[in-house]
Image (cartoon, helix red, strand yellow):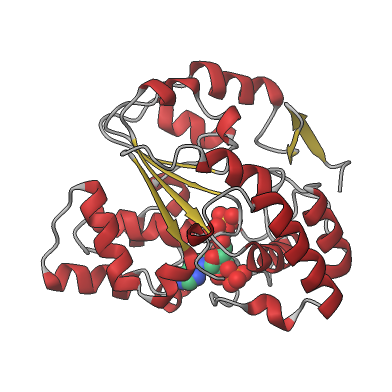
Amino acid sequence: MTGECVWFEGIPFPSMEFPSEHLREVQEDFIIKDEDVLLLTYPQSGMNWLMETVCLIHSKGDPKWIQSVPIWERSPWVEAFSGYNLLKDKEGPRFITSHLFVQLFPRSFFKSKAKVIYLIRNPRDVLVSGYFFWRIAKFVKRPQSLEQYFEWFVEGNVVFGSWFNHTWGWMSMRNKENFLILSYEEMKWDTRSTVEKICQFLGKKLEPEELNSVLKNSSFQAMKENSMSNYSLLKGQYFEENGQLLRKGVTGDWRNYFTVAQAETFDKLFQEKMADLPQDLFLWK
Ligand code: PPS
């Protein structure tokens, strides 16, 4: 996997948008404000779904904002050069998105009261989703087969680093009151309750019809059809013409791709690496 990426503190990043001097500036100089809302995930965990949901909660279900401004401008990626520049000049409470490891995150955050939503997903589905995503992206070395990507993933030899280390690192914050952990699985299985949980965490009260509109406009189908959220605006430049970020949007798709041997290898690795965390954090079990 190495090759077409840049390294920062032992973690590989895509070669565009993430120069190491910029990542250092993000870590040391970016000021997180108490009123900011931070959306954090390992890649392919449902970040865009979370972003869309939070934006719709903010607009009380009114889809005007999500249908007129690209998702990456509504909640910019702090570690990406272009996202950082948007955020620096933004007034008032901000939505901030990131795939960064906890140790690379802006240091100012650890002294702030900013609210964090950390979304996790079954890493087996993250792996499969990532395999298809990186095959359509033009800015990283593409895996040639799922078998190859499986090897890269279990070794943590993928852009943005190891799922296991990312999850471990952020889970150390789990008992803080400004930190909410959600899973892609609970969002799928009971979207309404999860949206209510987010509202409560953010201190937002929605009327029933506003909540219904959040659910309707953040659904897989609605996002797939929304050019401000489906990344069709970046096709050609960053993604292949036939590429889809919104691929299937289901849980358990890994079962269609893993061999029995891969499933066993993954189970063993998961047990080794995650044994010391409370297992009820992992709802897909
Ligand atoms: S990224 O590029 O890392 O920010 O990607 P991310 O958004 O985290 O993850 C992409 C996967 O999330 C699925 N997705 C959704 N699932 C259900 N409902 C909605 N609304 C939704 N929006 C995005 C998307 O389909 C990717 O998962 P896969 O399994 O590949 O379909």
Query: Going 32% across and 65% down the picture, which residue do you hit?
Result: 194
Give how far across and how far down residue 16 sits, in percent.
Answer: 71, 38
* Picture quadrant of ligand 1: bottom right
Residue 110 in view, yes or no: yes
> Horizontally, is 137 left or right of 276 in the view?
right
Residue that sits furthest to the bottom in the current view: 256
Residue that sits furthest to the left in the current view: 207
Vertical arrangement, residue 178 with respect to residue 89, above or below: below
Query: Going 54% across and 29% down the picture, which residue do you hit?
Result: 105
Give how far across and how far down residue 278 sits, in percent.
Answer: 51, 53
Front residue of 237 and 223:
223
- Give the quarter of the image for residue 18: top right
Q: Look at the image and tell me in which quarter the C terminus lies.
A: bottom right
Give how far across and how far down residue 56 sits, in percent.
Answer: 28, 59
Residue 145 in view, yes or no: no
Query: Going 31% across and 54% down the picture, which residue do you hit?
Result: 55
> Horizontally, is 253 left or right of 186 in the view?
right
Vertical arrangement, residue 223 with respect to residue 279, above or below: below
> How many marks are shown on the rendered structure?
0
Front residue of 168 and 113:
168
Vertical arrangement, residue 146 with respect to residue 77, above or below: below
Vertical arrangement, residue 201 with respect to residue 264, above or below: above
